[in-house]
Image (cartoon, rainbow, N blue to C red):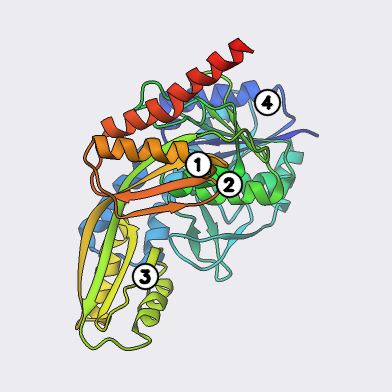
Amino acid sequence: MSTAILKFGGSSVADNIKLNVVAEKIISLKEKFENLVVVVSAQGKTTDGLLKEAEELSAIPEEREMDMLLSVGEQITASKLSILLNRMGYKAISLTGWQAGIITNSVHRNAKIEEICTERILKELENGKIVIVTGFQGVNEKNEITTLGRGGSDTTAVALQAGLNADKCYIFSDVDGIYTADPNIIEMARKLNEISFDEMQEIADAGAKVLHNRCIQIGKKFNCNIISKSTFSDNKGTTVCKQIENSEIKSIVKNENLVNIKIEGENRTDNIAKEIYQALLRENIIVEAFKQNDNEKLSIEFRIQKTEQNRLFELLESKYPKYSFKKTDITKLSIIGYGITQDNKILNKIMNIFNQNELSFNEVNLTQSKIEIITQKMSDNVVKEMHKQLIENIKKEDNKNANNI
């Protein structure tokens, strides 16, 4: 029996009118697949609204209580969609994360799926029902509700594809695939037909809000092709798969949601850097590029997401009051494509654009699939120029050369 996983993001289910569009999409796919499991996000900006309300009550709310609060958004969407489908004559049932058997570790606000007990889902499918599962959430061994981090509904969907051995996994949103840059900023951004897991992982890690980074890891591990499509059109989407394409730039991502943290103080001890790093780990504060500068005084630097600032500052003020710290807003520019760091022409073009715009940079990091530059504030015009020089012009040159063969 053919099975498909369908995931619909918050913009797709933002109101009752859009829920009707989603219902029609589900019904159309019911003609192609015998079994459908639908994963839903909270409607529109529901999660943002709940976060704001919680922060009005406490600057640093308890993580467990936040999971209790934030998980309600997906439950509202799932139940409303089930009500709608049943009225339209299609048997459906909504399940929370724990009812669907999604077992996670005990890390609140950023839990990882450890196991999926699929018995309940399979039973409902055998009874001919469309199963609607709340994304973004699960339950730990203590029966506490956990959430998977922002964008975690994608991970729920791909994990269910792996657990149910489903034939297809569609991630529906308000865009019709993966683009070479944010199409809201770059008008000439080009949609990709295919992209490899490794390249997509780099795009997600760079900060692009296209697919949740952990869903890519699961897809790669279990060889689950992921199809990114639009809820509101029938355009062909982008398939994320194992295939490695030609050595070319696939995407440019600008991430301004980062801050650089510098901790300084007298009387440095040998283990203080390790102690601070372990404290960050215990608090589940994810850091990038943690380094201790080589001098007699304490001098530590690292990067975190802006959303982690309050928790970090509380930790430093309570545990390490004798050290001073300061933050600096930064921009992380990521140029992504398998094998691109082997081509010095690309690096030279990037440096030329920086020179022309009188931009400096703090770091340049290279991997097999990514050029990452840490700099100060960067305008969208610089990103547009990058896209023009590194993607649009190169594509034109390739087409010209192909015509001359």
Q: Is residue 98 visible?
A: yes
Q: CA distance from mark 3 to mark 1?
A: 29 Å
Residue 158, x across and y down, in percent: 62, 45
- The residue beneath circle 2 is 216
Indicate left or right for 205 with 86 as reference.
Answer: left
Q: Quadrant of the N terminus?
A: top right
Q: Amino acid at mark 1?
A: Leu
Q: Residue furthest top?
A: 403
- The residue beneath circle 4 is 30
Residue at the image position 31 percent from the left and 68 percent from the top: 301
Asked if disc 1 and disc 2 are in contact, CB closer than 8 Å, the reply is: yes
Q: CA distance from mark 1 to mark 2?
A: 8 Å
Q: Secondary structure at mark 3?
A: strand
Q: Earlier in the sequence, mark 4 or mark 1?
A: 4
Asked if disc 4 and disc 1 are in contact, CB closer than 8 Å, the reply is: no
Q: CA distance from mark 4 to mark 3?
A: 52 Å
Q: Secondary structure at mark 2?
A: helix
Residue at the image position 56 percent from the left and 66 percent from the top: 105
